[in-house]
């Protein structure tokens, strides 16, 4: 389905290539990085053959850090997004398919978490759990599931009005069977949510790391920005350690945005085809 | 009316529950804040005991909760007690001294965001398919995807270092002593341009995309075609007929956006060392100053809830269909 619809879509092609490119960089990091990212050379070197993007204030090679950093940044981004999606859709499905009373309770709880602003809550929880990128993932899952739960719930509720669900129920299929039948219908929505969540997760990971709540023992785009921020590297006129990691995050985000909007376009086309009028 | 009472009571319960969750969060930690602070500042045993007594942390959890409900939830204005870090100072005073900066920055950027997002959205929908629309859309997606603190740095590099137009940090220049002079106001305005720009650039794209897509939908409505057939001027159709209807959902975004905006504000204040609440809260969280943290969340959650109710009302006023629906 993805191949058939998205390749035709220019935005989709762009999004998929960005995703593929960054994925390839992350996987091939040991071969692409020209230097050991932890090794200290002379600080604040400019762009040269030895150091493709120069070095930062601690003398570490920016290009190699960028390559290695993509690993954890993307892993945390995609991992948290998947976690949020799974947890959020489980709550959404449970809410839509259970009794009205359960639905009310689950949705009120979702509302409560929604009322607490995300970033302060993220910072708060990250501080409590301590540094470490697994904690960052956990914290993000805890703070960001409600939106997904809401989206999935309303989608399933509208699907429940369709005649085929009625038919399935008449055939005597249980709740799990129903979920199995519903999943292909909400799959495009799940995929679009996943790409959107990945953008947010990457940005929030960078934000947490930037504030000094990330894992200082691993290199991510966020910790690179953190070190550049703390060392005040731009005050001596070396802009690359700040510009490069942020640009990577942004390009990745733009790609994911286009991918999400391509998926939504395809989804809208398909739903239009389904409707008889 | 009945709908509103139901909604108000639900919102009230959500508000109380959110505050209770905030009460429990720091207390779920294996080690209390006083022990961590003692560890950090190498305090003697007696000091820890004294702190426990002073902040009421030695009481059973139920008593603490009752006190919290009494002092914070069911009391107006709420009493958050003293700050752990700056001990004799009240939380209220700390927050109030930082609040004006944030309110100023937030309100001004909210206004600019709404205006800029709407106007560019209207133009993009009007000129759909042209180069202008393409550039605007790409710019919007770019700003939407970039972390706000990074964009702040880019603005600093461009406008403070390369072209020395605006100052890179702070809220006013420290050399000015008198607070009520024209010079001071000018300095405040100059210092707020870059932080405001950073917030606007990351928030406006959501409005832009929403307005643009809504405009395109409204353009297909029958009454627009009627207006065209009548020979109404294109400009009038775009602004009077289409934009008025397409801006409605943007108003509801206004309410939900506040929380997100605040997140951006925290990062922006961290980059620009702007003395607002955002910087205060980061310092308070990193410093384990829980009373300040709770005070901050109280304000934000309350503000968010008020905003969502106000948005509902505004929506009813500007969209007659909701009233009868």
Image (cartoon, rainbow, N blue to C red):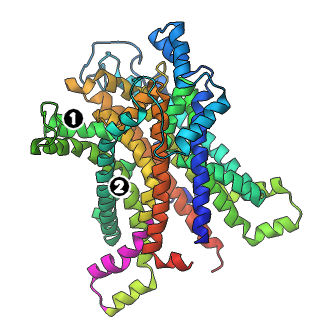
Question: Crowding near pointer 1: few (<14 within 10 Å), some, many (20+)?
Answer: many
Question: Residue at 88% of width from left, 66% of height from top?
Answer: A171
Note whether B246 is above or below B90 in the view shown. Answer: below
Q: Residue at x 30, y 44 (%)?
A: B100
Which residue is more in the foreground, A11 or B72? Answer: B72
CB-based contact (under 8 Å), mark 2 and mark 1: no
Question: Looking at the rendering, which quadrant does residue A183 occupy?
Answer: bottom right
Range covered by the magenta-colored residues: B231-249
Q: Position of residue A36 (x, y in %)?
A: 42, 16
Above or below: residue A112 compared with residue B175: below
Tell me the quarter of the picture where residue A139 sits: top right
Residue B231: image x %, image y %? 30, 91
Q: Chain of mark 1?
A: B
Residue A183 visible (yes or no): no
Label 2 neighbourhood size at 10 Å, few (<14), some (14-19), many (20+)? many
Q: Can residue A268 be found in the magenta stretch?
A: no
Relative placement, left or right, of A103 versus B283 is: right
User: Helix, strand, or loop for circle 1?
Assistant: loop
Q: Earlier in the sequence, mark 2 or mark 1?
A: 1
Left or right: where A107 falls relative to B152: right
Q: Which residue is mark 1?
A: B168
Whether discs 2 and 1 lie on one chain: the answer is yes
> Marks 2 and 1, Cα distance to the nearest angstrom?
22 Å
Residue that numbered label 2 is attached to: B204
Residue at the spot x=31%, y=57% of the render?
A: B111
């Amino acid at each position: 389905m993805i191949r058939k619809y998205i390749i035709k879509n220019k935005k989709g092609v762009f999004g998929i290539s960005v995703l593929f490119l960054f994925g390839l960089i992350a996987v091939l990091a040991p071969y692409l990085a020209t230097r050991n990212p932890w090794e200290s050379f002379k600080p604040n070197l400019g762009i040269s053959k030895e150091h493709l993007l120069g070095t930062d204030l601690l003398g570490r090679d920016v290009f190699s850090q960028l390559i290695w950093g993509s690993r954890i940044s993307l892993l945390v981004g995609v991992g948290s997004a998947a976690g949020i999606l799974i947890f959020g859709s489980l709550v959404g499905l449970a809410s839509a398919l259970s009794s009205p009373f359960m639905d009310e309770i689950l949705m009120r709880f979702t509302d409560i978490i929604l009322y607490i602003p995300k970033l302060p809550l993220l910072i708060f929880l990250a501080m409590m759990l301590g540094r470490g990128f697994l904690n960052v993932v956990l914290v993000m899952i805890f703070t960001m599931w409600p939106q997904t739960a809401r989206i999935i719930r309303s989608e399933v509720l509208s699907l429940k009005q369709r005649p085929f669900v009625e038919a399935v129920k008449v055939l005597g299929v249980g709740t799990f069977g129903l979920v199995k039948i519903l999943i292909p219908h909400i799959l495009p929505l799940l995929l679009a949510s996943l790409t959107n969540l990945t953008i947010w997760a990457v940005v929030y990971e960078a934000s947490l790391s930037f504030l000094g709540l990330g894992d200082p023992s691993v290199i991510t785009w966020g910790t690179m920005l953190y070190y550049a921020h703390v060392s005040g590297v731009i005050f001596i006129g070396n802009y690359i350690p700040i510009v490069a990691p942020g640009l990577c995050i942004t390009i990745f985000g733009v790609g994911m945005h286009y991918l999400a909007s391509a998926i939504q376009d395809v989804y809208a086309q398909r739903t239009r085809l389904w409707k008889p009028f | 009316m009945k709908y509103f009472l139901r909604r108000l009571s639900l919102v009230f319960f959500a508000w109380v529950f959110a505050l209770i969750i905030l009460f429990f969060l720091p207390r779920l930690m294996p080690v209390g804040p006083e022990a961590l602070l003692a560890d950090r500042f190498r305090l003697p045993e007696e000091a820890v005991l004294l702190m426990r007594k002073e902040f009421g942390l030695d009481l059973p959890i139920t008593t603490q909760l009752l006190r919290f409900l009494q002092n914070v939830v069911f009391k107006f204005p709420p009493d958050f007690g003293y700050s752990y870090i700056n001990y004799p100072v009240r939380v209220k005073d700390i927050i109030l001294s930082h609040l004006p900066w944030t309110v100023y920055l937030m309100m001004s950027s909210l206004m600019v965001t709404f205006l800029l997002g709407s106007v560019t959205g209207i133009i993009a929908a009007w000129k759909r398919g042209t180069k202008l629309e393409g550039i605007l859309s790409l710019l919007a997606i770019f700003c939407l995807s970039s972390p706000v603190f990074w964009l702040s740095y880019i603005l600093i590099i461009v406008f403070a270092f390369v072209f020395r137009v605006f100052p890179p940090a702070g809220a006013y220049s420290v050399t000015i002593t008198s607070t009520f002079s024209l010079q001071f106001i000018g300095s405040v305005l100059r210092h707020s341009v870059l932080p405001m720009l950073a917030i606007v650039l990351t928030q406006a794209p959501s409005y832009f995309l929403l307005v643009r897509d809504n405009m395109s939908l409204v353009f297909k409505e029958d009454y627009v075609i009627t207006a065209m057939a009548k020979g109404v001027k294109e400009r009038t159709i775009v602004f009077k007929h289409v934009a008025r209807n397409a801006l409605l959902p943007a108003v509801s975004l206004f309410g939900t956006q506040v929380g997100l905006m605040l997140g951006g504000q925290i990062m922006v204040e961290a980059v620009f060392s702007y003395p607002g609440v955002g910087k205060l809260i980061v310092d308070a969280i990193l410093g384990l100053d829980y009373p300040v943290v709770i005070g901050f969340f109280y304000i934000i959650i309350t503000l968010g809830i008020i905003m969502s109710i106000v948005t509902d009302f505004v929506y009813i006023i500007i969209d007659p269909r909701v009233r009868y629906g």
